[in-house]
Amino acid sequence: MRSIRAAAVGAVTLSLALAVSACGGGTPTGGGSNDSPKTLTYWASNQGASIEIDKKVLQPELDKFEKQNGIKVKLEVVPWNDLLNRILTATTSGQGPDVLNIGNTWSASLQATGALLPWDEKNFAAIGGRDRFVDSALGSTGAPGKDPAAVPLYSMAYGLYYNKKIFAEAGISKPPATWAELIADGKKIQAKGKQAIGAEGASLNENVHHVFVFAKQHGADFFTADGKPDFTSDKVVAAVKQYVDLMAKDKVIPPGNAEYAQNQSVSDFAKGRTAMLLWQTASANLRSQGMNPDDYGITPVPVQSGTPGSGTQINSMVAGVNVAVFKNTHNLDGATQFVKFLTSDEEQKILNKAFSSIPPVKTAQADPAFNTPETAVLKNTLATSAAALPQVPSESQFETTVGTAVKELFADAAAGRAVTTESVKAKLLKAQQQMPAK
Amino acid sequence: MTTTVDAGRPTAQKSSRAAGPRRGRPGRSGRAGRAWLPYLLLLPALILELLVHLVPMVIGAVMSLKEITQFYIRNWTAAPWSGFDNYRVSVDVDAPVGEALLHSFFVTVGFTLLSVALCWLIGTAAAICLQDSFRGRGLLRTLFLVPYALPVYAAVITWVFMFQHDNGLVNHVLHDQLHLTDKPSFWLIGDNSFWALLTVSVWRGWPFAFLIVMAGLQNIPRELYEAAALDGAGMWQQIRRITLPSLRPVNQVLVLVLFLWTFNDFNTPYVMFGKAAPRAADLISVHIYQASFVSWDFGTGSAMSVLLLLFLLVVTGVYLAVTSRGRRTADV
């Protein structure tokens, strides 16, 4: 008996110790140093269709950097699903890379941890100055009024991708410019037996990106001017409802998309099952799935009425990736040099071409390679009608709570349950109550 | 384990168990000079036990008393003490965080009870079916163990594909072929997700029960069955009167281990539903993960972990006390 009890207690202890220890760690660490000037570790986000592709793109550039500066860069491409957790773990333990990529929407949240090197005038001067970067990209590098926590590396924006062949079959001559047109076109497409528009209903990030834009179009924000969550105002509720209604009421998003979270909507589009897709810089992804670039067109994301612009005519978030330096790097000078290298005109052109993103560096953006019809639409969107997600410390919690609320609303819609103003408001209220109090 | 044969006859069991070790001891105490040796040999294990188990647990408990949000994770020793605030938030069932935790707790309890019961039932039934040797028994045994041997991620992601709404095998069979439902069902979102999760959990868990019960069955002497058959006991009676009582000590551990594993299972729900599980399938392990990693509030996450630890300790203690007493009274 005793051995059984001991085994049982051991089993409980072990399992819980594992659970608890997952939250353990933590070494107080100071600022950076230059103890190991010859090496750097770089965590790159996954920009291409696969990690292997990213490695193939990045490695020759890192070799070039080593030849120029004598610093060897150890590369790790981290999948998006793991990246934030890895950064949090690195922050907690103090054991992290020297240079890393972050999703630009995390900038303010990560800035609040104090783990990233602030880009003050001096640091910016070391990489050629703040003025080299496009304003919209700089707007997504940290809380306003603070030194940016990161430097823009790749910029992206949402566009409406549409299948030319399906549009022609349905007798649609030009892509929709407003949501009402999109719904009307969707009906015509459905009449031809195709699905109208795809969505990643179970992806928290995608949901948040879309409802953020809808909120802007309704003249609303998810946060008050002083950074407090404000998810339940009438306008925000109407905005979220309008997005979910694309499935619930207008029925242009197929119910099955409510469980999509692995980019299945991109595959559906690439395979010609759905006629439209709202996505950020999808071309590399579509190409890797075998879709011919001539088969689809790209146009700005619809607005309520009129044409895209600022204010309520916003039609995309400022999407993108920033590069940051971990504050307790052991090669501060090398890290800065590496950021300078990555944001140089030449590297900006090479990397953004490979990843079909847009350079946030003004001089690189002028390159003709970024004037293709697709990039022209996205570049124009970024310049004139894109807004940065809220730059508040609790941004990443906002993505989780509101993203979950929208996911649950999609689940309701898919199951045939009514999505009403009240039900939307209730979900958003729950989301707001789960935001950190401080 | 040989004692299991005599589960019905307590005296034999007790004496054989107690006498074994005691008989050995006097000889050892004769060499009193080396009495320290066993302790010395235990020392590395003890130190590792402290390092691997106790220290992280204590750190976790300490963290639960601190306010470890994103502002302090970089140097959490400097995080302010928050007393029992994290616990207060976790157990305040009128507020959303506490309400969600309580809901997740109930879901987990219901899920665990069902899963353990089904795993045990299927595992035991399969083991009894394969008790007598016949052609192809080895093959069936191997086949039954496959779910247990497969890597978790690969196995669960396959189930995710099968549960998909549009192209999944499950809907294809239930809806397209058998016409059991009016329209294809959602298994990965909404209320059905509970049953999807339960299916995968049972599929993954029952081979373990099968394995353990099969091992236990090896120790039941054939003669008992032969004697019972001579006395006119049918198969059902043999199972009830011989097999199950003989398996009792095995089952006691098996059920407990299954319970703890299922209750704490993180991989299955995480691979199936990702960071935000549907409300109907919001298991507590993922819930706590979300409270700490996704919300960046490690203090509250630790407090929830400690509460879970206390709960499981209580359950284990009560379970062992009750089953042992039950056994003792049954023995008398």
Image (cartoon, helix red, strand yellow):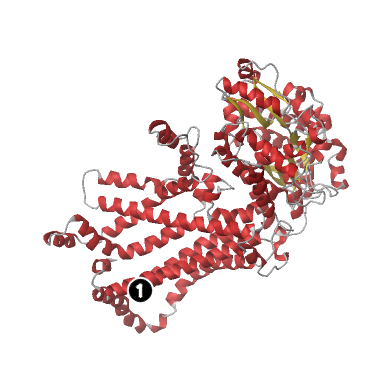
- Image quadrant assignment for residue A68: top right
Task: Give the residue number, with chain letter if any, for mark 1.
Answer: B325
Residue at x 63% of width, y 57% of height: B96
- Measured as percent of width and height from the top left, residue A292 is found at 62, 20
Position above or below: B120 against A361: below
User: Camera-side residue: A271 or A25?
Assistant: A271
* Quarter the N terminus of chain A occupies: bottom left
The answer to whether B215 appears left or right of A349 in the picture is left
The answer to whether B111 appears left or right of B136 in the picture is right
Q: Is residue A376 visible?
A: yes
Q: Chain of mark 1?
A: B
The answer to whether A63 appears left or right of A8 in the picture is right
Position above or below: A33 against B86: above
* Quarter the C terminus of chain A occupies: bottom right
- Measured as percent of width and height from the top left, residue B235 is found at 19, 55
- Measured as percent of width and height from the top left, residue A209 is found at 70, 39
User: Camera-side residue: A210 or B248?
Assistant: A210
Secondary structure at numbered mark 1: helix
